[in-house]
Image: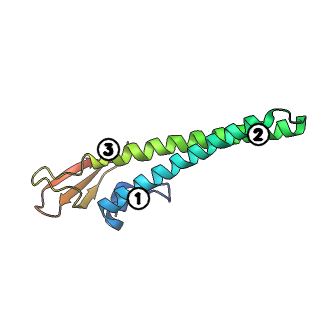
Amino acid sequence: MPSKSTNPLNHALAVGIERVGFRKWYERELLSSHAHMVLTVLCTVGLLGSFEAMRGASEGDRAMNVILVLLCAAIGLWALRRYLFLLTRAEDVANQANCGSCGEYGRFKVVGTRADATDVCCSKCRHCWTIASEA
């Protein structure tokens, strides 16, 4: 049994494919990455709102706005990093999901895992290849 990812929201490639299949795993990775992009946009709006609220505010309100700016910036940067990671990983794996023998896309079973790769076998022609899954 392949090892699980340390992040409970996004399973490792082998675990995700065994659980729901490649196409659903890919769809979920893209949805998760785009949710992080939305969080980044919301944090940007929060940053702009906090900067706007600083004008003409009292010292106590300014201190609170500085805290909110730092919080929005930290969360926004984390969300942007996570968005880019998930999107890049999903696209990298999707580029390797074609069977080299019959050309079938995304229809394979996991036959083995390693620390940096997943061995898969085509469901149509039984051709096996390796997908480099972990960066």
Q: Counting residues from the N terminus, which is met first, the one under dot 3 or under dot 1?
A: 1
Q: Counting residues from the N terminus, which is met first, the one under dot 1 or under dot 2?
A: 1
Question: What's the amino acid at mark 2?
Answer: Ile
Q: Position of residue 35 (x, y in %)?
A: 51, 52
Q: Position of residue 66 (x, y in %)?
A: 77, 36
Q: How many marks?
A: 3
In which quadrant of the rendered image does the C terminus lie? top left
Q: Nearer the viewer, residue 64 or 82?
A: 64
**What residue is shown with label 1?**
28
Q: Nearer the viewer, residue 134 or 57?
A: 57
Q: Residues within 10 Å of mark 3 (few under 14, many from 20)?
A: some
Using the image, tell me which numbered label, if any, was put on residue 67: 2
Residue 71 appears left or right of 96: right
**What residue is shown with label 3?**
92
Instruction: Indicate the secondary structure of the residue bearing disc 3.
Output: helix
Farthest-out residue, top:
55
Quarter-of-image position of residue 28: bottom left
Residue 53 appears left or right of 98: right
Mark 1–mark 2 distance (CA, rounded to whole Å): 33 Å
Q: Residues within 10 Å of mark 2 (few under 14, many from 20)?
A: few
Mark 3 or 1: the one toward you: 1
Whether residue 65 is visible here, answered yes or no, is: yes
Using the image, tell me which numbered label, if any, was put on residue 83: none
Question: What's the amino acid at mark 1?
Answer: Arg
Q: Position of residue 108 (x, y in %)?
A: 22, 60
